Amino acid sequence: MDKAGIATNEQMKAEAVSRMKLLGLKQEFIDAFEDEEACEITVFWSKWVKGFEPYPIEDEELDAVMEFEKSNPGLAWAVIHDITNEDGEDWDGYYILYVGDNPQKWEDERKELLEGSPLVYFKSVSSESYTVHSGFDTIKAEVHDGILIGTV
């Protein structure tokens, strides 16, 4: 940590791994994230999307993560993808779980995560008629059989 109390990327990554283990995520997701060559973020699905398996981050989610990390001091470690149909049109929403750069907040953030109500960054991407918006929100998140599931 530097003099201002701001965590480095390495410290945030270690904290992210700690949170993944604390939640009981499958080791394969943790290993992929820890991989120095790739640092692969896993995308999970919302509770309302049935039958989908977690997958490595793809371009659309990566764009949302990069936009978040460019504008906010923190490190993303997972994404929950939600697909909603509104007025007959589908739109995607990405809920980005992250570690902020202020270690003094980490204990409270871990408690919120364990209670199943983490603060996330939300980014919607959608059809032509639905506007794109983003911001911070609290969601319900739980782990079943080592897989993170969001209720949005």
Image: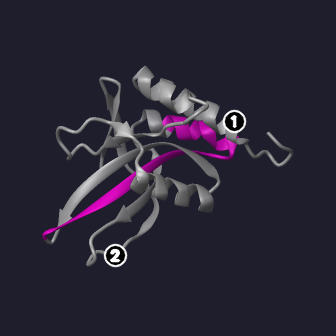
Q: Image point 28% across, 74% down: which residue? A: 130
Q: Name the residue under label 2.
A: 131
Whole-percent x, y for residue 44 in the image:
34, 40
Q: Can residue 108 be found in the magenta stretch?
A: yes
Residue drawn at (44%, 28%), measured in percent from left and top? 29
Q: Position of residue 111 (x, y in %)?
A: 51, 35
The answer to whether residue 32 is above or below residue 97 is above
Q: Residue furthest right?
A: 3
Q: Is residue 24 visible?
A: no
Give the percent coordinates (x, y) of residue 41. 47, 39
SS for tag 1?
Answer: helix
Q: Is 6 part of what is drawn in magenta?
A: no
In the shown orientation, is residue 121 left or right of residue 8?
left
Rounded to the nearest angstrom, the CA distance separating label 2 from label 1 is: 36 Å
Count of numbered marks:
2
Q: Is residue 135 left or right of residue 151?
A: right
x then y, percent, for residue 91: 26, 63
In the image, is residue 102 above or below residue 63? above
Where, by quadrant of the figure, is residue 1 drawn?
Answer: top right
Q: How is the image coloured?
A: one colour
Residue 21 left/right relative to 95? right
Q: What stretch is highlighted in magenta?
A: 88-111
Crowding at dot 2, Cα within 10 Å, few <14 / some 14-19 / many 20+, comes out as few
Q: Earlier in the sequence, mark 2 or mark 1?
A: 1
Residue labelled with disc 1: 10
Q: Looking at the image, which residue is at 60% across and 62% down?
A: 71
Q: What amino acid type should be assigned to the residue bearing mark 1?
A: Glu
Residue sticking out furthest to the front: 37
